Image (cartoon, rainbow, N blue to C red):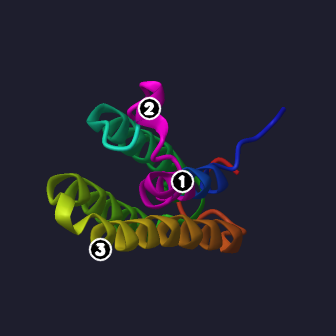
């Protein structure tokens, strides 16, 4: 049975979001010539944020519930999500809000990964490993 490393998937999604937000405008400014509007497409931005929330929440909840029982990765992750939504609200500060958002989200996944690796025994009756 194939297992999914949700933390690696979450980090990948966060990095993809960062690349989209920071580099896409620099390299793909010719897209409107072809009728493609991804750069300031509000729907696309919110779909990317929603994907990050769903993937990150699954990864962090799995680590919390089945391995380490530390809430700090989830708190750090959702702080990063708040910065992502702030980036959508205050467009003039997008880069200044994107950097802490990505750093917080990637840090949350990294901490969750480390906690999961350290958890070599169950901490509560709800562990199933």
Q: Label 2 belongs to which residue? A: 33
Mark 3 or mark 1: which is in front? 1
Q: Nearer the viewer, residue 88 or 80?
A: 88
Magenta span includes 24: yes
Between marks 3 and 1, how big is the CA–CA gap? 20 Å
Sequence order check, earlier mark of 3 and 1: 1
Which of the pair 121/39 is nearer the observer? 39
Task: Verify whether residue 102 appears in magenta.
Answer: no
Q: Name the residue at 55% across, 58% down.
A: 15
- Secondary structure, mark 2, is helix
Give the foreground label among 3 and 2: 2
Q: Position of residue 119 (x, y in %)?
A: 66, 69
**Residue linked to disc 1:** 27
In front: label 1 or label 2: 2
Residue drawn at point x = 33 percent, y = 69 percent:
95
Q: Earlier in the sequence, mark 1 or mark 2?
A: 1
Mark 2 and mark 3 in contact (Cβ < 8 Å)?
no
- The number of discs equals 3
- Tell me residue 82's x, y (percent): 25, 60
Instruction: Identify the residue shown where x is 27% and y is 64%.
Output: 94
- Residue at horizontal 50%, vertical 73%? 107
Query: Mark 3 — residue?
Result: 96
Dot 3: what SS? helix
Left or right of 9 on screen, residue 91? left
- Report the predominant secondary structure element of the magenta stretch: helix
- Quadrant position of the N terminus in the picture: top right
Residue 80 drawn at (x, y percent): 34, 64
The residue stretch that appears in magenta = 15-37
């Amino acid at each position: 049975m194939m297992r999914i490393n949700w933390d690696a998937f979450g980090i990948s999604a966060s990095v993809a979001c960062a690349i989209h937000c920071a580099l896409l405008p620099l390299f793909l400014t010719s897209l409107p010539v072809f009728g493609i509007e991804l750069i300031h497409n509000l729907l696309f931005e919110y779909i990317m944020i929603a994907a990050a929330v769903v993937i990150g929440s699954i990864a962090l909840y799995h680590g919390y519930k089945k391995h380490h029982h530390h809430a700090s990765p989830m708190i750090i992750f959702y702080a990063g999500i708040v910065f992502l939504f702030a980036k959508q609200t205050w467009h003039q500060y997008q880069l200044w809000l994107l950097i802490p958002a990505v750093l917080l989200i990637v840090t949350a996944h990294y901490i969750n990964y480390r906690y999961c690796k350290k958890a070599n025994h169950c901490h509560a009756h709800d562990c199933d490993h």
